[in-house]
Image: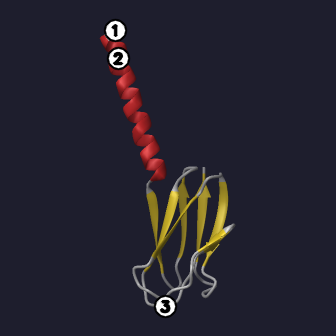
């Protein structure tokens, strides 16, 4: 019985760690000329952080941030479905993030 209880506790701990990592934010430095592909699990979050004083926003399918040039500003979005999503800055055509959700 003790072995079963220990096994159950270890299984619960592994499941909790996996769930926490799925919901931890993946950060993206958001600046002119940035291009990055990130891979996350369904339910995961991507956080864009303004790394310069240029005006930026984040626009993706069904969501967008406000336009601001405040360095250090951030915007987060949780991806609730699987797929590949192209996220861009509407001001700078050379800024984008590809988010691959598995």
Residue at disc 2, secondary structure: helix
Q: Are marks 3 and 1 in contact (CB under 8 Å)?
A: no
Q: Position of residue 8 (x, y in %)?
A: 39, 22
Q: Position of residue 97 (x, y in %)?
A: 58, 71
Q: How many marks?
A: 3
Q: Are marks 2 and 1 in contact (CB under 8 Å)?
A: yes
Check disc 1: other Cα within 10 Å, few if <14, some if 14-19, many if 20+.
few
Q: Position of residue 86 (x, y in %)?
A: 65, 69
Q: Position of residue 70 (x, y in %)?
A: 44, 86
Residue at disc 3, secondary structure: loop
The quadrant in which residue 79 appears is bottom right
Check disc 2: other Cα within 10 Å, few if <14, some if 14-19, many if 20+.
few
The quadrant in which residue 83 appears is bottom right
Circle on res. 54? 3
Q: In the rendered image, which quarter contains the N terminus?
A: top left
Residue tagged 1:
1
Q: CA distance from mark 2 to mark 3?
A: 56 Å
Q: Which residue is rendered at x = 40% and y = 30% of the image? A: 12
Q: Are marks 2 and 3 in contact (CB under 8 Å)?
A: no
Residue tagged 2:
5
Residue 49 seen in the figure: no
Residue at disc 1, secondary structure: loop
Give above or below for 102 relative to 47. above
Q: Which residue is rendered at x = 52% and y = 54% of the image? A: 44
Mark 3 vs 1, N-terminal side: 1
């Amino acid at each position: 019985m003790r072995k079963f209880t220990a096994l159950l506790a270890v299984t619960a701990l592994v499941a909790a760690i996996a769930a926490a990592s799925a919901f931890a934010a993946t950060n993206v430095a958001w600046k002119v000329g940035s291009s990055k592909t990130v891979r996350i699990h369904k339910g995961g979050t991507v956080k864009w952080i303004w790394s310069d004083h240029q005006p930026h926003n984040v626009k993706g399918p069904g969501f967008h941030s406000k336009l601001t040039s405040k360095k250090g500003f951030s915007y987060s979005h949780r991806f609730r479905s699987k797929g590949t999503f192209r996220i861009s800055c509407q001001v700078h055509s050379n800024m984008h993030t590809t988010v691959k959700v598995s």
